[in-house]
Image (spheres, rainbow, N blue to C red):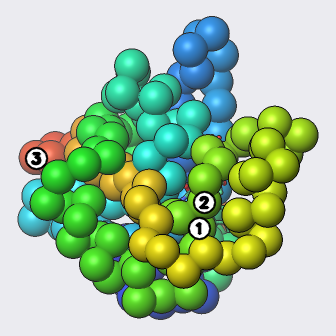
Amino acid sequence: MELGRATQDRHHAWRTPVLATTAEDGLPQARTVVLREADANTAHLRFYTDGRSAKVSQLSDRPDAVLVFWSKRLNWQLRVRVSVTALTTGPLVESVWARVRQSAAAGDYLSHLAPGTALSAATPTEVRSIAAQPTEPRRHHVGVLDAQVQEMDWLELARGGHRRARLSADTWEWLTP
Ligand SMILES: Cc1cc2nc3c(=O)[nH]c(=O)nc-3n(C[C@H](O)[C@H](O)[C@H](O)COP(=O)(O)O)c2cc1C
């Protein structure tokens, strides 16, 4: 499965899809995320994030979301309708942190400030403590987005003719591109 390959291959274009959600004001929001895990058997995709980020509260309110993948090499677009469970505590989150904390990305999950906080909102104490890189253990803010795939819309662009198909758990059909 191509999505599985994208989790292994850092250069795979499908490693960085766009995740679209609905914000609290009812308007759409979208951002790039890294595909970390793909399980073809259970039709689950996983992403790591900061548990305090806007997308986590958006998905907790409205779990329906869309992922858009595009690969220039394959000339494939994949639009995936998902239902997302946003986890900020529990064994899965801790097991992800156990892996992430060994990596260069660990610092991303240890910031005192939530993503999107205006930098002018940081108090002088917070700014000093960020600059001083304190050595005491800090609380991590890892969040896991666990996406259950509902339906996929696959589009292939080709000189000889485009192809498009709709796929769900046990059905698929060709569509007019
Ligand atoms: C290439 C790329 C990869 C990214 N990967 C992630 C990711 O895996 N998780 C994440 O939370 N944010 C990731 N980001 C940052 C998000 O796009 C976004 O800016 C941030 O998560 C805040 O989004 P939000 O305010 O909608 O929650 C990535 C950005 C880029 C450009």
SS type, badge 2: loop
Query: Are there few (<14), some (14-19), or many (20+) residues within 10 Å of tag 2?
Result: some
Circle 3 or circle 2, nearest the eye: 2
Which tag, 3 or 1, sits closer to the chain's start?
A: 1
Query: Are there few (<14), some (14-19), or many (20+) residues within 10 Å of tag 3?
Result: few
Q: Is mark 2 in CB contact (under 8 Å) with mark 1?
A: yes
Q: Quadrant of residue 22?
A: top right
- Residue toward you, 135 or 81: 135
Residue 147, position in %: x, y?
30, 47
Residue 78, position in %: x, y?
49, 55
- Residue toward you, 131 or 108: 131
Distance from disc 2 to disc 1, alpha carbons, whole Å, reads 6 Å
Q: Amino acid at mark 1?
A: Asp
Circle 3 or circle 1, nearest the eye: 1
Disc marking residue 111: 2
SS type, badge 1: helix
Residue shown at 64% from the left, 39% from the top: 30
Kindly identify which residue carries mark 1.
108
In the image, residue 130 above or below residue 52: below
Q: Amino acid at mark 2?
A: Ser
Residue 12, position in %: x, y?
55, 82
Residue shown at 72% from the left, 65% from the top: 130
Task: Mark yes or no: residue 153 visible.
Answer: no
**Left-right relation of 107 to 88:** right
Task: Mark yes or no: residue 42 visible.
Answer: yes
